[in-house]
Image (spheres, helix red, strand yellow):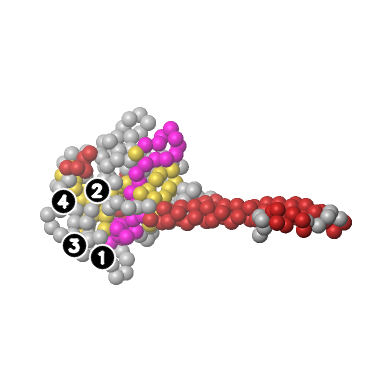
Amino acid sequence: MADHRGPSRAGSTPAAGPDSNAANFESGSAVPSQNKQSFGHHAGAFVRELLAVVIGAVIVASLLRGFVGQMFIIPSTSMQNTLQVEDRVVVEKLSSIKRGQVVVFADPGGWLSGASPAERGRLGRALEFVGVLPDTSTEHLIKRVVGMPGDRVVCCDDRDRITVNDIPLNEASYLYRSPDGVLADPSKIRFDVTVPADRVFVLGDNRAASRDARCHLNDATAGRPKGDNAFVPLDLVVGRAVAIAWPVGDARRLLVPATYAGVPAPTEPAPARPVVHAGPEANC
């Protein structure tokens, strides 16, 4: 520490000499060394901070993907014209499921068919895992919820409309239309079902090209009632599709059609086992 008593020590200042010059040289040569050390220290600190930011971003993205939202790629024509092949949809995982929503769910067993999409490389899989790229998993499907637990869903009334709890649905706003404007039939398969507890009944918007709940009403599985596989467990539902994110020209929100607002709640508690009446054509 410097002594600031100045004049009282002035007479004791040694004359400059070789030792003094050497000391000055050594003192001056220490500056570049300190600068190098300082630069290395700052560079290391920057790298550590950058890694912390990247790791934090990956953790946040993974948490968002796991608990908040995720993107999926539409693999088939079963939801046309609401969704087109290769559309990217945003799926929200926080809110409860309601009638009329488009939902993504894991395969209940035996629903999936067709070719699998090309597998991504390591980088692509990593970006998909953290939610930067949409999920290309072949284990998920996307359909519209038509019946909730306890709902009675019937095809069809005397005007060929599907009914839910005795209320006919006006599905003209979302059912498939051909290029010349012809609206598809609600269903060629006739059925009368009551959705069991903790399950949903789902259909594709392009009914003629959709392997949905109707196709499994006659499924026989050991230890389960006939048609049990037609109803998707709520715990297999990933979430509801809220918007199309890509292509940009087709980007829009996916709203619940107005017709579902008129469907009343079921009058009876949901049964533990499904009630299924369907003809032999219910196997797609």
Q: Marks 2 and 3, how far apart in space?
A: 18 Å
Residue 219 position, x and y percent, is 31, 60
Whether residue 129 is visible to the viewer of this picture, yes or no, is: no
For residue 99, the mark is 2
Q: Is residue 194 above or below residue 167?
A: below
Three-letter residue code for mark 2 = Arg
The mark nearer the N terminus, 2 or 3, is 2
Is 263 within the magenta? no
Three-letter residue code for mark 3 = Pro
Q: Marks 4 and 2, how far apart in space?
A: 10 Å
Crowding around mark 3 (Cα neighbors within 10 Å: few <14, some 14 to 19, many 20+) is some
Residue 262 position, x and y percent, is 17, 42
Q: In the image, which is nearer the foreground, mark 2 or mark 3?
A: 2
Residue denoted by label 4? 265
Q: Marks 4 and 3, how far apart in space?
A: 14 Å
Residue for point 29% across, 40% down: 255
Circle 3: element type? loop
Residue denoted by label 3? 271
The mark nearer the N terminus, 4 or 2, is 2
Q: Marks 1 and 4, how far apart in space?
A: 25 Å
Crowding around mark 4 (Cα neighbors within 10 Å: few <14, some 14 to 19, many 20+) is few
Tell me whether circle 1 and circle 4 mark residues in contact (CB < 8 Å).
Answer: no
| Image: magenta residue range | 228-252
Crowding around mark 1 (Cα neighbors within 10 Å: few <14, some 14 to 19, many 20+) is some
